[in-house]
């Protein structure tokens, strides 16, 4: 009963863990896709509105330029120039000249569409065209005349006015071409608002997703719109505001037309901008539900497949009793290679323990306990390596190649470090670098994308002997006290090169925050004195690692090496040491 309860607990734990991880991943991916697509749709809507605005403004400015060119032709017409020059000289125009002027202007007007009326006034505000007694300052405001004078001959666009037959009034000075552009009169052109019909740009089809376009003057009078009379231009304060029109939300884009100080407003329904988002959300939700159900089923079978063989192994181990015949082989096989490997490892352990039991009963209790511990200590590394190998095959089967590589690297690190030989063990630089790369691979898993490294060593240097575990402590310090404490992406480089003194230079460089000048001076001084205190570097592991490496270099090579050399700045730390190319033979 206890085993079944334990099994159910283990199954539930594995089921909850697998399911939670999958749901979190699916939910995160779903939210991310939804956010990215929403931003993309809004960006596309904004681009569409900006393109419409640019096209509309270009059309309006082109029409304004045509009116400006036309009014310039009228103002510089030979007859107009002659009559304005006579008036400026004090010669009053006759009725026949006024009639001739009217005919001349009508000829010019015939070549330009959108003109409702043309008026010409003298500098004294008398009307030449039309022939009437109404003066310029009586017909138009003084502010309009002042704007014309300030423009110095340029065309001035004013507001839409119902007073002048629903026209847009423009005005400019008439200046003499042959007298240094002397101001001699005024030209007023009434423009038909229908000239600025933007139907070719605006969507005129009435629909729920219709874009609305308004062209307004300085006072907010509507010059053109594709909206019905029931739709009014809402207030908007800035670019891409969201406004309400008839209880519907619209994106608003406002652009100014510099030539007339007019304003163009474009409203696009939010539903149009986010069209397709609802379908995407439904697809994501359905995919999430289907994936969750499939993963729940898969998690149950995986948990059952793993938990049952492990429970049998636990039951066999708990049932073992020294001298009681409780150590038994597990003869059952599993579909999992990893579980079979664990069973084989356990069976090997049983064989070893059964042989040891005979020795235990032949000796005194205290001596037997001591020998048993010694024998167990011999088994543990073997059990560790086999267990790591089992994890490797399980991860490979589940498609987790990166984690499997880390397990292989960890096993290699343990084999390299745990191997029991004398402390004066020597290896090749190639073996030492391979060990360093396995260690870096494990660190890469912990630091993930925050860390990268490079190893530069020519093949001819890889066979040169070096004391074992000489490079790893320096790498470990560089990661722990440099890269891990940096906010930027960590980079570590290991370089093996040769100098002119027939020595190899091994350098470990990181881009961490580095030592302060005070810390660097203290560390260098105490390394030279041969006694690095813990308090000097404010970190026990850093002090011991540098001290041990420095002392091992001095003991191994004597006067042929100067030990560790440390350089540090805000851009990183560089630790290097020299060894002779021909140092000693391999053990």
Image (tube, rainbow, N blue to C red):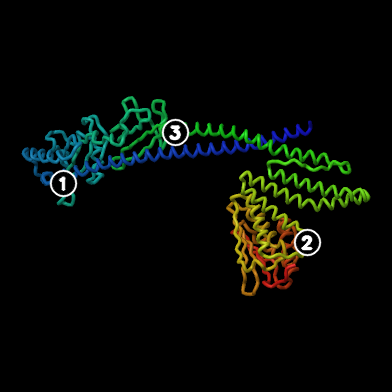
Asked if disc 3 and disc 1 are in contact, CB closer than 8 Å, the reply is: no
Which residue is identified by label 3? Answer: 276
Which residue is identified by label 2? Answer: 421
Question: Which sits earlier in the primary sequence, circle 1 or circle 2?
Answer: 1
Residue at left offset 37%, top offset 33%: 267
Residue at the limit of the structure toward the left, as seen here: 96
Indicate the quadrant where residue 191 lies: top left
Question: Which sits earlier in the primary sequence, circle 3 or circle 1?
Answer: 1
Which residue is identified by label 1? Answer: 76
Q: Nearer the viewer, residue 128 or 167?
A: 167
Q: Quadrant of the C terminus?
A: bottom right
Q: Nearer the viewer, residue 170 or 271?
A: 271
Residue at left offset 65%, top offset 46%: 395
Kindly tell me whether residue 488 is visible in this rendering. yes
In percent of width and height, residue 364 lies at 94, 50
Kindly tell me whether residue 88 is visible in this rendering. no
Count of numbered marks? 3
């Amino acid at each position: 009963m206890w085993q079944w309860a334990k099994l159910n607990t283990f199954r539930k734990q594995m089921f909850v863990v697998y399911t939670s991880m999958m749901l979190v991943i699916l939910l995160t991916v779903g939210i991310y896709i939804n956010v990215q697509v929403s931003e993309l749709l809004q960006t596309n809507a904004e681009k569409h509105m900006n393109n419409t605005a640019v096209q509309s403004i270009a059309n309006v400015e082109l029409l304004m330029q045509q009116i400006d060119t036309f009014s310039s032709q009228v103002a510089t017409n030979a007859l107009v120039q002659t009559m304005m020059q006579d008036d400026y000289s004090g010669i009053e125009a006759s009725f026949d000249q006024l009639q001739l002027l009217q005919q001349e202007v009508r000829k010019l007007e015939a070549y330009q569409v959108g003109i409702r009326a043309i008026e010409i006034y003298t500098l004294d505000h008398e009307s030449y065209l039309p022939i009437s007694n109404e003066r310029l300052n009586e017909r138009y405001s003084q502010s309009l005349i002042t704007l014309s004078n300030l423009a110095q001959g340029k065309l001035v666009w004013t507001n839409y006015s119902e007073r002048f037959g629903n026209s847009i009034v423009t005005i400019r000075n008439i200046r003499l071409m042959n007298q240094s552009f002397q101001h001699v009169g005024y030209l007023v052109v009434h423009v038909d608002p229908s000239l600025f019909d933007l139907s070719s740009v605006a969507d005129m089809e009435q629909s729920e997703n219709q874009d609305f376009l308004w062209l307004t003057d300085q006072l907010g009078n509507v010059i053109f719109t594709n909206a019905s009379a029931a739709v009014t231009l809402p207030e908007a304060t800035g670019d891409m505001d969201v406004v309400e029109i008839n209880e519907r939300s619209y994106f608003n884009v406002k652009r100014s037309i510099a030539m007339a100080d007019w304003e163009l407003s474009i409203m696009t329904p939010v539903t149009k901008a986010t069209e397709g988002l609802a379908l995407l959300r439904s697809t994501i939700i359905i995919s999430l539900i289907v994936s969750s159900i499939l993963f729940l089923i898969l998690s149950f079978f995986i948990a059952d497949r793993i938990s049952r063989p492990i429970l049998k192994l636990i039951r066999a181990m708990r049932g073992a009793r020294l001298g009681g015949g409780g150590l038994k082989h597990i003869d059952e096989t599993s579909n999992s290679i990893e579980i079979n490997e664990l069973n084989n490892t356990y069976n090997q352990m049983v064989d070893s323990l059964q042989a040891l039991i005979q020795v235990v009963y032949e000796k005194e209790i205290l001596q037997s306990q001591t020998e048993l511990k010694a024998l167990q200590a011999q088994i543990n590394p073997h059990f560790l390596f086999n267990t790591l190998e089992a994890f490797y095959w399980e991860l490979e089967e589940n498609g987790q190649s990166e984690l499997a590589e880390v397990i292989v690297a960890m096993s290699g690190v343990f084999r390299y470090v745990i191997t029991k030989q004398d402390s004066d063990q020597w290896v090749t630089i190639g073996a030492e670098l391979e060990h360093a790369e396995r260690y870096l691979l494990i660190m890469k898993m912990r630091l993930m994308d925050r860390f990268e490294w490079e190893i530069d060593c020519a093949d001819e240097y890889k066979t040169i002997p070096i004391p074992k575990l000489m490079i790893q402590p320096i790498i470990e310090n560089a990661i722990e006290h440099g890269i891990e404490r940096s906010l930027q992406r960590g980079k570590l480089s290991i370089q093996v090169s040769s100098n002119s003194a027939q020595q190899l230079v091994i350098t470990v460089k990181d881009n961490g925050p580095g030592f302060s000048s005070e810390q660097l001076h203290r560390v260098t001084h105490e390394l030279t004195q041969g006694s690095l205190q813990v308090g000097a570097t404010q970190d026990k592991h850093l002090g011991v690692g540098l001290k041990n490496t420095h002392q091992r270099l001095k003991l191994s090579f004597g006067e042929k090496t100067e030990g560790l050399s440390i350089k540090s700045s805000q851009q990183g730390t560089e630790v290097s040491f020299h060894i002779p190319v021909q140092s000693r033979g391999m053990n």
